Amino acid sequence: MDYLKELARKGIERSRDYPDESFQIRGLWRTDLMFKPNPAERTFDYTFLLVQTFGEGACYCSTIPALAEGERLLGKDCREVEHDYRCFEVATTDAMYSAFEKHPDESHSMTGPARKKALWRSGLVVTEVMRHLETMDASPGRVVNVGVIGNIVKMLSDRGVDVVGTDEDPAIVGTKIDGAPVYSEDRTVELVEECDVAVMTGMIISTQTMGDILAAAKRGGTKLIMFCETGANLCEEYVKFGIDSAIAEPFPFYIFGGSTRIDIYRKK
């Protein structure tokens, strides 16, 4: 099952209750970034795409083409365009869902510099991890962080949790972050099945690995937590697919100064 195509189908049906102008593509941004919010964190070296309709849809991806490839999308209805690149499909679907009313279980906001928001954001994710470990009676438990975030690893390790990571960045694969070994992304499915909780980024929708991860979690009885800048507007739907907690961070992201909002959705 291609979860993204299913989300697009559901979104188009739901959009009939909203004005057409809510789905007009008004802007596109392709941003290259390097970011290290504090000494405990790795250096993030990424590219992300934003598509703006009613709000912004986002996708982090290593293969985003130059924006000239997306120029034909400007002014078009995001529900009707065809996509040559997965990143545009993710960001456009995410932008479609930005128009819909949402009902998070929790909502948090913080205003301040990025270095402080980095710790605040990681703390929210870790609190959700610990909540699951406690309900599973698995404390201290074993957690795999798919798409390693150094602050999350450190906070979990400080709580006595056994943490491992997987990542596609060759600069950190084979190293240890705060004592946690980092393996290649090729071991993600294996480690998801073995661990009590898996913490992963929203990029699993763009890499088309969500299906494999959900299946591995079902086999292993693993709780799944997603924290999403990619596909933040889709989080309410992710928990319906079987994600246990989906943590949404709509644009503007914590990496920018000012205000950031984080919403938490939980599987019912």
Image (tube, helix red, strand yellow):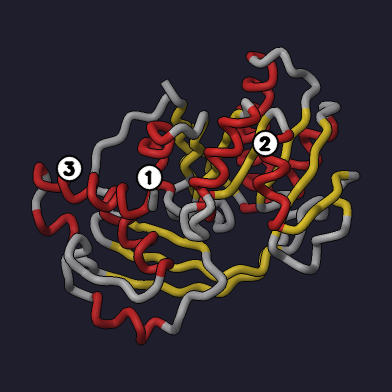
- Answer left or right for 257 relative to 166: left
Label 1 to label 2: alpha-carbon separation: 24 Å
Mark 2, secondary structure of its residue? helix
- Could you tell me the amino acid type at mark 2? Glu
- Could you tell me the amino acid type at mark 1? Leu
Between residues 198 and 54, which one lies in front from this camera angle? Answer: 198
Between residues 263 and 164, which one lies in front from this camera angle? Answer: 164
Between residues 207 and 40, which one lies in front from this camera angle? Answer: 207
Which percent across, then down, holds residue 125? 62, 35
Query: On residue 14, which mark appears?
Result: 3
Label 3 to label 2: alpha-carbon separation: 34 Å
- Answer left or right for 243 relative to 88: right
Look at 80% across and 38% down and name the residue there.
Answer: 163
Q: Quadrant of residue 239?
A: top left
Label 3 to label 1: alpha-carbon separation: 13 Å
- Could you tell me the amino acid type at mark 3? Arg
44 shown above or below 259: below
Q: Which residue is mark 2?
A: 193
- Answer left or right for 154 relative to 118: right
- Of mark 3 and mark 1, the one earlier in the sequence is 3
Q: Pointer 3: residues within 10 angstroms few (<14), some, or many (20+)?
A: few
Look at 32% across and 54% down and name the residue there.
Answer: 5
Q: Which residue is mark 1?
A: 234
